[in-house]
Amino acid sequence: MHAQARGSGLGAAALSAMGADGVLARWTRAALACLTVGLWVASWLPAAAAEPAVAKPSSAATTAASRTTRAARRIDWDILLPKSERANYSDEAPEPIHDYLGENGKAARQHGSIAVNAEMDEKLVQIPGFVVPLVQDETGLVTVFFLVPYFGACIHVPPPPANQIIHVVAAKPLNNVQTMDAFWVSGTLDIAYSESPPWGASGYRMKADTVTPYTKR
């Protein structure tokens, strides 16, 4: 009886010890799990904090980039006329007037239609032409000019019709530009009538993105 009780006592102590060991093991596992999660979070937070914020481009910048990446449509001057006038289009300059403007003569009267091609409004285009400077800054750089289809227009030759003149505002002032220099001009074309005495009136306006010397293409 005594031996059985002693045996039973040893068994209870062993079971108690095993129970304590089990609780300790569970706590240890839980502590290790928390430590592992803590280390993972600690390793992630600095990287996230160090990651720079990416600035979103403004709508204006996006629009400008979109305009730059889009290809400008290359056009000729006849497309600026309404369809009803294109059959009579001629790219020949009229006869010069030798005492016009540059030789102290009066400005020749501008003739022809002011009707425009409504389909060309707000179109990104590239067009060749000759420059008639309208505005220059204090250093002599050209900032605003007429673009005309033939040599001598508005100088020794009467101005073309308003629908054959583009009033251009250069994105960057132009250096070493002389009257009647030839250029390719690219930008968004708008329908806008304006008068620039004594040179004439224009039926279109453009804010030029690029102005490059003319070469055959």
Image: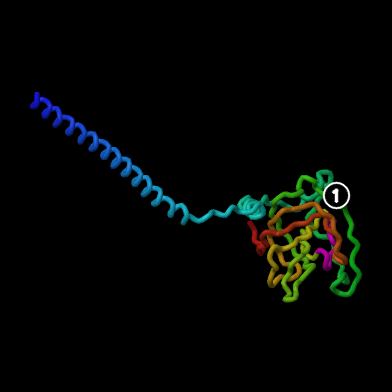
Give the image location of residue 161, x and y in percent.
85, 56
- Quarter of the rendering occupied by the N terminus: top left
Give the residue type that dot 1 points to.
Answer: Ala
- Quarter of the rendering occupied by the C terminus: bottom right
Q: Is residue 20 left or right of residue 199?
A: left
Q: Secondary structure at mark 1?
A: loop
Q: Nearer the viewer, residue 38 or 174?
A: 38
The image quarter containing residue 64 is bottom right
Q: Is residue 31 above or below residue 142?
A: above
Q: Residue at x 37, y 45 (%)?
A: 37
Q: Is residue 62 above or below residue 141?
A: above
Q: Nearer the viewer, residue 94 or 164?
A: 164
Span highlighted in magenta in the image: 153-162
The image quarter containing residue 151 is bottom right
Q: Can you identify the residue that label 1 sits on?
A: 115
The image quarter containing residue 30 is top left
